[in-house]
Amino acid sequence: MTQTIAPRLRTLVLLLVAAACALLAGAGPASAHAALTGSDPREGAVVDTAPAQVSLTFSESVSTDDDSLRVLDPKGKRVDDGKPSGTGGTTYSVKLHAGLPDGTYTVTYQVVSADSHPVAGAYTFSVGAPSETSVTVSGPSAGGGFVGGLYGVGRYVSYSGFAVLVGGAAFVLACWPRGSGVRVLQRVVVSGWLALTAATLLLLLLRGSYTGSGKFADVFDLNLLGEVLQTKPGAALVSRLLLLAAAALFIAVLFGAYDKREDEEKRDLTFGLAVGGSVVAAGLAATWAMSEHASVGLQAGLAMPVDVVHLIAVATWLGGLTALLVSLYRAPADTPVPALAVRRFSRVAFGSVIALVVTGTYQSWRQLGSWTAFTDTRYGQLLLVKIGLVAVLVGVAYFSRRWTAQLAEAAPAVAGAAAARRAEKGAGKAGTKASGNASAKASGNASAKAGTKAPGNAKVAQKESGTAKGSGTAKGSGGSQRAAQLARQRAAVDAARQKRQRDADPNRFGLRRSVLAEAGIAVVLLVVTTVLTQTEPGRTEEEAKAAGGSSAAASAPSTGAVTLDMPFDTGAQNGKGVVRVELDPARVGANDMHLYVERPDGTAFDIPEVKVALTQKAKDIGPLPVAPDHITTGHWSASGVQIPMAGDWEVAVTVRTSDIDQVTISKNTQIG
């Protein structure tokens, strides 16, 4: 039965690698988590005169440098002063040179969002009229390329190392204290520490190039590294390295002084190690929570501790599962994983699942904001995959709990067999000793008798005796080596016998298979979780789509003037009529407005006053007042009426027909 495990293990590992590669291939570079939600001038806008500055508005605060915002003329020459200024935390502007000629200008931006991810993009606007431009924008480059790929690998390794380090140590302390002396468990925890440390150093070196030029040569730029250390993500990575130094001390105590203590002494030391380990684990988790998704957006003060609990729960469950799997397959035959340890881990895993459900529900609400975001955004789709994997994992864990309940300990049988072998070996030694004594006695009697008969042969006997003694010594040395070799062979045979005896338990065999399946699903779950941390949250993606829709509307060609006929009645004599509002060309930017006032029979007439206000309620813009000039009977006009953005605008007209009689009428129209 055990011979079939290795092929199954190899097959499952290959399937897991294939699934992980598919997920990694679809992940791509880290998505921008701060979306561009507005700009002035807007994308595709045509303005009459050159603006004094260009402003960009993002969905969250970003960090900039002198080259973050650039404006290029049709020939590709910079026309900005290169010093972005921020207003309000999310809006940043750069001043333009005076006297810019007509033509199409390109705006490029590359900033770093508050959750540590690079954001890049470009758009165009025109002054006077669109023109040809030699500027080519290849698309966002931040976070991509070879450096971006290495950075992504570092993120995956760091999450995996954290899970194995925290979960493996928790498994030893909470479930199997005697496992601190098992070499394979020691290797698991130390491997997690090494992986997390190496990945953190790699991320720290790559950070500057990852958010900047993307060139591999910049990885070794010490000046760039110094700038990284002054940022929030850089400080988080340095803090993680300091906490890993404390984790190294924890590991040394766990597998050193703790392992050498007796059971009674271990109980006293367990509490101190548990408290210290929890503090270090929470600190490591906080280095992610304080620099990524949880640190920005809604309820950041609550989201960060929730994220810490979520990460620790994931590590305790998945890392502990890794430690259990390795122990079931690789632990020495004389120290098998006891059923009590498996039952304890089952309870710990159940508590971790509850924590994951509670914290995950809160995080989902915070990052999505609507039910439609589950299906309409990539973050929501990945979250559905994660929820499905967790459900499957819980189902497999249920079967593992059933095997755990039926698990029969093989240790007593193994111990009994070992005791019988020791007794048999002792009896054999006693028989050999008795036989040797009898032989020696008989040999002594014969020698004494021979000496009595032939005393003259004493010297010859003594010489032969010396020769025999030397020969016996050499023979004894060879016998010792042979005995040691036989002892090693017997030990190997005993270990194999104990392993067969342990694996013969069908319940233990079933547990190993179910835990192996759990670990396989857990690997894919960890990959999906890491991809989620690099994916734009659903809220931000929907905001970006809304902004993109407005931008597209703004850049659409004008369909001509908009005409609105609005009847009015002020309630006074001669207070009835119709106001016709014409807006030309009804697009973002400057427009001409004409108002015509007519009686119900269609004849033009004058009124004391007419006013106009424009409002876009969806964006909370306005009312923007317009005071038209009287041109002729029943005709008012206003030029250069500025429409700041496309969308559904309310046009409200206030008509006054006497000193006390007036009314306000309105209609909505799509502009842009």
Image (cartoon, rainbow, N blue to C red):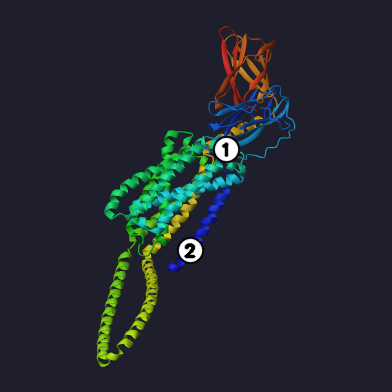
Of residues 465 and 543, the one nearer the viewer is: 465
Image quarter of residue 68: top right
Left or right: 490, with 381 as reference point? left
Q: Residue at x 71, y 33 (%)?
A: 76
Residue of label 2: 8
Q: Compared to 317, does 75 lie above or below?
A: above
Residue of label 1: 224
Image quarter of residue 90: top right
The N terminus lies in quadrant: bottom left
Percent coordinates x, y for residue 111 in the rendering: 58, 34
- Say what amino acid the circle numbered 1 marks: Leu
- Say what amino acid the circle numbered 2 marks: Arg
Q: What is the crowding at mark 2: few (fewer than 14 residues within 10 Å), some, or many (at least 20)?
A: few
Q: Earlier in the sequence, mark 2 or mark 1?
A: 2
Q: Label 1's element?
A: helix
Q: Residue at x 62, y 19 (%)?
A: 566
Q: Compared to 189, does 563 lie above or below?
A: above
Q: Is residue 33 visible?
A: no
Q: Of circles 2 and 1, which is in front?
A: 1
